[in-house]
Amino acid sequence: MIDKLHYISQQCEHGSHLTAIQHALEAGCKWIQLRVKNELNDLILKYAIEANKICKQYDAKLIVNDHPEIALEAGAYGVHLGLEDMPIAQARIMVGGKMIIGGTANSFQHIRQRTAEGADYIGLGPYRFTATKQNLKPVLGLEGYKTILQQMRVFNIHIPIIAVGGILLDDIAAIMQTGVCGVAVSSALTFADKQEKMVEKMYQYLNAPSFKTSHLNKSDSNKRPCSK
């Protein structure tokens, strides 16, 4: 199952990525993406191994950004690959059929590409400008999500879509109405004054009834539905 709330790690004010991950787990997050940029692989592996241990203590899933070999060695639940990272098909050979693989997309064309490549879910964005992302792609905004999700319906494409990029608490209700599966957040949680309360409110919005349907064919056993 793919959780509706993804926390993407960043270094917090008084600590490391691991500190931020610990706080997110304590606040109630169940899906953690370790995203460490511009560091040596040895350090990222150390982070991944320790993050996976912490996640298991909270019955949470760890996804490693960019590095399938590190995800495999650390025993992570999955890996998330950007458009310029290793091809998903190559990563699948490396990590095997059981590990979940997410892929980044910025357009409907990317959605088709990622679906054809065999991604288990897609991180679609950015919703708005975010300082945590280098080489930022064109911002989609709410209308961009509406357009792309409508195109998915027309072409009968069924894959979980996670909205990502500068998303704040007050954005979630409207984003979910587009038909996405869930959202990924980083700064909105990392720098929240009361993280547990923030996670609680986020799940309230994520689980609120919606007239849209998630873009997942329930009969497709190769895909993993979002958890409720």
Image (cartoon, rainbow, N blue to C red):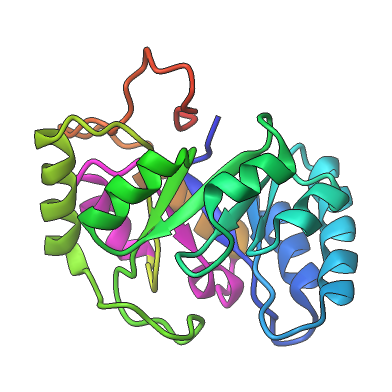
Residue sitting nearer the eye, 58 or 201: 58
Task: Pinpoint residue 178: horizontal percent, then vertical percent.
Answer: 19, 47
Residue sitting nearer the eye, 122 or 92: 92
Asked if residue 21 is among those painted magenta in the image, a careful observer would answer: no
How many numbered badges does the structure rendering display?
0
Direction top: furthest residue: 219
**On the rendered structure, is 80 left or right of 159?**
right
Task: Pinpoint residue 17: horizontal percent, then vertical percent.
Answer: 75, 73
Which region shows up in magenta? 169-194
**On the rendered structure, is 137 left or right of 34?**
left
Residue at point 89%, 73% (across, down):
42
Query: Which corner quadrant of the image does residue 89 belong to?
Result: top right
Query: Which corner quadrant of the image does residue 24 belong to?
Result: bottom right
Residue at point 40%, 62% (across, down):
164
- Report whether residue 197 is seen: no
Which quadrant of the figure contains the N terminus? top right
